[in-house]
Every structure is written in structure tokens, then in C-alpha cells.
Amino acid sequence: MSIRKTVFLCVFVVGLAPPLVRGQAAAEFRDRHRDAQGWPAEAIRASHGMVATDEELGSEAGVAILKRGGNAVDAAVAVAFALAVVEPAAGNIGGGGFMLIRLADGKTTFLDYREVAPAKATRDMYITKDGQLDKEASVIGYRSIAVPGTVAGLTLALKSYGSMKLADVMAPAIGLAENGFPISKRLAHEFEEERGGLERFTVSRHIFLNDGKMFQPGDTLRQPELAATLKRIAKNGATSFYRGEIAHVLVDDVSRLGGLITLDDLAKYQPKVREVLRAKYESNGHAWEVLTSPPPSSGGVAIIEALNMLESVPLKGWDDVQSVHIVAEVMRRVFADRAAYLADPDYSSVPVAGLTDPCYAKEIFTTVDPQHASSSKVIKAGNPHTCGLAASNATAAQNLVSLGEGPHTTHFSVVDGVGNAVASTYTLNDSYGSHATCSAGFLLNDEMDDFTTQPGVPNALFGLVQSEANAIAPGHRPLSSMTPTILLRDGQLSFVTGSPGGPTIISATLLSILNWMRLGMEPQAAINAPRFHHQWLPDRVLLETAFPSSLESALNARGHATHRIGNLGLVNAIAIDPVTGDRLGAADPRDDGAAVGY
Ligand code: GLY
């Protein structure tokens, strides 16, 4: 179905709400309303549209499209192309992702433009002759690249649900690539941090390291090769990327430098339209519906399973050790199930209905000790096929194998003036993906590392485990944690959320939902609140540094191993004020996220 015309018919009662914040004023508003650690203390409020991304320039690109009369999907596509220019660590056209769309008329869809393994890929392609995992090959360089899906996904989104021409929504991205943009302190620092990987590839070294001279904050980053590629896509659509000139450049580079992708792989790439996962809850006197990501995302299943387990558990907040303990125990069990059951649904039978059944959650929750930490040696995946018969929490953990997921990905949320909403997460996997940049000016993913690279060996980045079903095979999509999610309250759009962060995507997104739906936090507070994460293995709770040591000691006293980590996730969310209908943009201050509305 298509929403070719968007009519802005917004009559909102502003009442006693804070003043509206329009366009550029958003930054000033943020500066005036900061908490003790310099983070925005409240969400940006606007009456028409809102875009929340990791980068102010990306958010502005989306708002420019909304102001021109584009709908949320037009704006989302503009944002995704713009982030491919201004957020090279994760924004991309050489990677893949997911887009969850909910239209104002209630229709929903999920676009899966996850990368796929090339036809020449094999199960043991990263195992050396002496049986060892080649730890580098799946994360850096040409052999780590899976067939990119982003351009196919974005053009499908626009064609199916947008109202504007591709060239128009791509104009902001093309301008940013051609004219350049000022390099922020953070971006200059990132180039420095990634120098070791980027300088191994001539094109990456040229574009991002200024041919080794390195950029300083305030310098302008111009990307003429990327601008030319974006112009080709704007003119000729996805065909230019998958069959035309760009495809030839990509395949020339890849085959010259040892990668596997062929012209045939590109020509065969297809994004998928999937059914949205849904679950209903009662909380604080309201009926909530969670719309979330189906496999090959593992996140939607995990979040519904977790919310099911937590439904009748009182939660007080994250300064309460009992609340943190229970949620950590729930995460432990959800990740054990993720490890055993989640994979590409086109090639494996994933027991989605069983795992998301409230009856199953009840069974699993009986294994949680309210006072003491369980051991992940004892807690294994459950048996979602026997719900109602007998709890079986010690089976189905055979054949667990490693999972590699990168720390960098990016999530953005968009709501337009009539209430169409988009939650989208897309990725190159690691920060800067494979670190190899195609001569056509864009970075290429290292998504092959999201497959099981070697059975039985914990993943180098996150030590995650999962099932044999996620083994490398031609045409398969690697399992993902990306979880774009939308919440409805009493049938109305209420919260648009998601996060990057490999497996911590699931915890960060879950916590944002709990903060909004269960704890009733103000939206920015819901994003700023400290985060924690448990992924079953390794058996420890990751705690952001903001947690007081007293809480850590209390968790230790209950038997939890703990480990401190700087930041978990980067959630860029939009809430809807239930009284005024205003859009409340809450970007994540952990990485200079910016919500811009009008
Ligand atoms: N590469 C991160 C994810 O898909 O979960």
C-alpha cells in the first residue's frame, strides 16, 4: 500500500506543555536544558514531525524532507542516505538493516534488507587448515563482506510507502557528500581510533585518513566518489547498485582483493517484506501493543519473551537492586533461548510462536530465584515446544556455537505530522565494517562475522553463543540483534525506539521500553537512565559506569559477577505526548545523538 500524499492536519491542544522547539532552536533548547553531567534533561518537543538520529546533520536531513511535505518514510530514506555520508562508522549503503513502518492508518510492515552470504561462501571459510579460526578474516578486509542490502531496502521502502522521488530524498545526502561537512571532534577521534584498520585499504586511507595526513576537528570532509555514487543511485535507482556501474566497480575491487561477491550475487539480492511481531500488555491502566522485529532479528522475539516474563513483576527502577536482579535474570534466560533457536527464518524453523507465548514465559520464569543469581552453567535454553506440559529448562542447548556481532550500528526514529512512524536500524556490523572502502566511495560491511564462524568457539567481540542454524551458507542472512520497535498505547502511536550495540541492542531497547511503558519515565530520562546487560554467556552483568558502587555490591552479594562498561547502546527514540500529541524527541547523549523537530 502506498501513502503518496501526506496531508498535515494537526490540531493539537498545547495546554501547559513546554514551548515548541522548531528546527535550529532544538540545539539551543538542548543547551539550555542540561543535567549535571551535561546531558539533555528533557526531550525536544515539536507539534509536527520529529527525527532522532546519532547525528544532527542526519536528523536535519530528515526534517528538511518532512518540511517539504514528505512523509515519515520519505524522511527515513533521506536520513539513511545522509547518515551514510556523515556517520561513516555505521551509516551506510554498503551494509544492511531493518525498517519497521507503522502508518497513521494502523498498517504495519517490516522491511528486511539484511545482507546475505555470497554464493561462494562456505560453512568453514574462516577455519584454517589446522582447524583454527582465522580471527581476522571475518571482521576485516574483503572476505568479511556479505552482499549489501541497504540500497535495495531503502528504494523498496520509498517505492512502497514514500511520496517523493528518490532524487529528492537523496538530495540532502548528495549535498553533504559533495560539499562536505565539518568534522566533529568525535569523528576526528574516531578516524584516529580506527586508523590501524583504515590505513590497510588505499581508498579508506585516502577518504577517511586524508591520505595519512589525518583530519582535525573543523576540517571539511568531502566525499566526491560517494557523491558520484549517490547521484547514480538517485538517477537510476537500485539497479545501478545491483546491476550497473556501481556493481561492476564493487565486484572489480572485491575480486581483485580476495573477496567472494560476484555480479550474480548482487543481481540476485532481494530485500524481504516480513510480518511484524506483536504482543499486548496491560501497564499503568493502559493497553499497550508492542510492534517489533521478526527473525532474522533475534531482538523482537527476545524482547517479547522478556516482557512476557516481566509482566507481573513489580519494577521500581534501576536504583533498586531487586528490579535489576530480576531483569538481569530474565535477560540471561532470553539470551540462552536466542543462542539455541534464532536464525534466518527462510532456512530454519524458528519457534517464534513458542518463544513468544506468555505460557512459555511463565514456565521459564519459575526458574528465577528472586534473591540469588542463577548460574548460566545450569540455565540452558528452554523448550518452547512443550508449553503447558512441563518446564524443560535443561534441553536444547546442544550444538551451541559462537556468534560474532559488531559493536557499531545505528538506529534512527521518525514520526511525521500525521502520525506515520518509522523505526530503523542499519549497520556495517563493526564500526567502519570491513574497513575496506569500495572505489565507488562507500565502506563495505563485515557482516559475515554475524554468522557462526566456528562452532564451539566464543565470539571474539562479545563471547556470544548460538545455534548451528546460523552457520554460513550461500544466500543465508546472518542472525541479527537489531530491533527497531514501536509501541502503541490504547491503540495510539506512543513510542518509537531501537539501538545499535550488537547483543546489547536487545537490552538497551528492552530497557527503553520498560522505562517508558512500565516505569512511566519522561522520554529523555528513559534514554538517559543507566543501562545494564546480561547475555547468558559470559555469565556476568555488564553495568554502565553511572551505576553506584552500592548497587554493584548488592548485585555481587546476590551472586552476580559484574563488569563495568562505559556505555551500552545508543537509543534514539520518539515518544508521543498522550495529552497534546506533541512529538517528544529523545536522542542518546552517549554519542551526541540529536533529535530535531518542527
Ligand atoms: N551487526 C549487528 C547486528 O545485526 O545485530
Image (cartoon, helix red, strand yellow):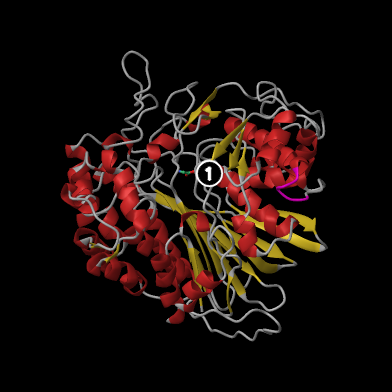
Q: Is residue 247 visible?
A: yes
Quadrant of the rendered image containing residue 586:
bottom right
Residue at the farthest top position: 130
Along the line of sight, the residue nearer the viewer: 240 or 563: 563
At x 64% / y 42%, what residue is drawn? 352
Along the line of sight, the residue nearer the viewer: 393 or 512: 512
Crowd rating for badge 1 (residues with CA inside 10 Å; few <14, some 14–19, many 20+): many
Quadrant of the rendered image containing residue 490:
bottom right
Q: Which x, y percent locates residue 60?
A: 42, 71
Kindly tell me whether mark 1's CB lies below 8 Å from ligand 1: yes
Along the line of sight, the residue nearer the viewer: 249 or 307: 307
205 horizontally vs 53: left or right: left
Q: Which residue does the numbered mark 1 point to in the structure image? A: 481
Q: Which x, y percent locates residue 454?
A: 43, 24
Give the amino acid at mark 1: Ser
Q: What stretch is highlighted in magenta?
A: 316-320
Is residue 317 inside the magenta stretch? yes
Q: Which x, y percent locates residue 250?
A: 23, 48
Main SS type for the magenta part? loop
